[in-house]
Image: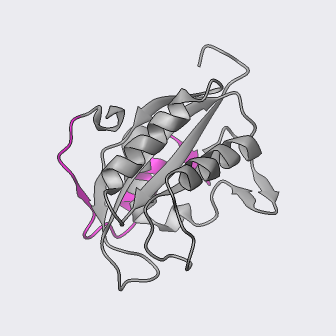
């Protein structure tokens, strides 16, 4: 990053209701439109089997690298406001959703506050997060191992990249 006041962060995006590609694209465009945040990289979109609650449609997932002048809490608030603008309804944990945005990593920070834990506490065990993250940041070190090593160690059966243009998220 050229601006030392900006932090490199990574987001996980997903959804399995309506048109998840459109919802993720709209989310990324909204985040990129924020004057203090810029989307730097976006992974491919992956079709992934549901996790946790398995009696629901497959998800589409991706990861994004952003550069932000926001604090971690402010970045989370931007993500939550974006979900709300897209009409996300929170009914059940791990249930179906139109869109989901998670702050996975925020610089080198380790944060444990009510409603905000970074790095994301469950991402290292979730292939649907780690496979897209490893695509855009293979050398990112997470708990002593690279994202690519972490992703390779997980069961990624059923996680399939979708054929979309490289700039799919720009609408």
Return the residue found at the far right: 113
Task: Give the quarter of the image for residue 41.
Answer: top left
Relative depth, front residue between 25 and 162: 25
Q: Please identify the quarter of the rendering in which residue 136 is found.
A: top left
Residue 114: % across, % down:
81, 63
Name which residue lies at 55% across and 54% down: 83
- Eyeballing the image, is 71 above or below 126? above
- Which residue sits furthest top? 2
Is 18 colored magenta in this rendering? no
Pick whichever, 115 or 82, lies toward us. Answer: 82
Residue 127, compared with residue 110, is above or below; it is below
With respect to residue 137, does 124 lie above or below? below
Q: Residue at x 75, y 50 (%)?
A: 110
Q: Is residue 151 visible?
A: yes
Position of residue 28 relative to residue 67, above or below, is below
The stretch drawn in magenta includes residue 140: yes
* Quadrant of the image containing the N terminus: top right
Query: Percent position (x, y) of residue 133?
Result: 44, 48
The chosen color scheme is: one colour
Q: Residue at x 74, y 57 (%)?
A: 116
Q: Where residue 134 sits: x, y (%)?
A: 41, 47
Over which residues does the magenta segment extend? 139-165
């Amino acid at each position: 990053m050229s601006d030392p006041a900006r932090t490199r962060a990574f987001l996980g995006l997903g959804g399995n209701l309506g048109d998840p590609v459109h919802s993720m694209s709209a989310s990324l465009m909204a985040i990129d439109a924020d004057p203090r945040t810029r989307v730097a990289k976006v992974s491919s979109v992956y079709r992934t089997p549901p996790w946790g609650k398995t009696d629901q449609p497959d998800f589409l997932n991706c990861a994004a690298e952003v550069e932000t002048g926001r604090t971690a809490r402010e970045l989370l608030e931007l993500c939550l406001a974006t979900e709300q603008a897209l009409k996300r309804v929170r009914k059940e944990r791990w249930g179906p959703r139109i869109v989901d945005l998670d702050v996975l990593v925020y610089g080198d920070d380790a944060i444990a506050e009510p409603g905000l834990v970074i790095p994301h506490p469950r991402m290292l065990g979730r292939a649907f997060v780690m496979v897209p993250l490893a695509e855009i940041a293979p050398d990112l070190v997470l708990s002593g191992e690279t994202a690519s090593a972490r992703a390779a160690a997980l069961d990624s059966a059923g996680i399939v990249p979708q054929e979309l243009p490289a700039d799919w998220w720009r609408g």
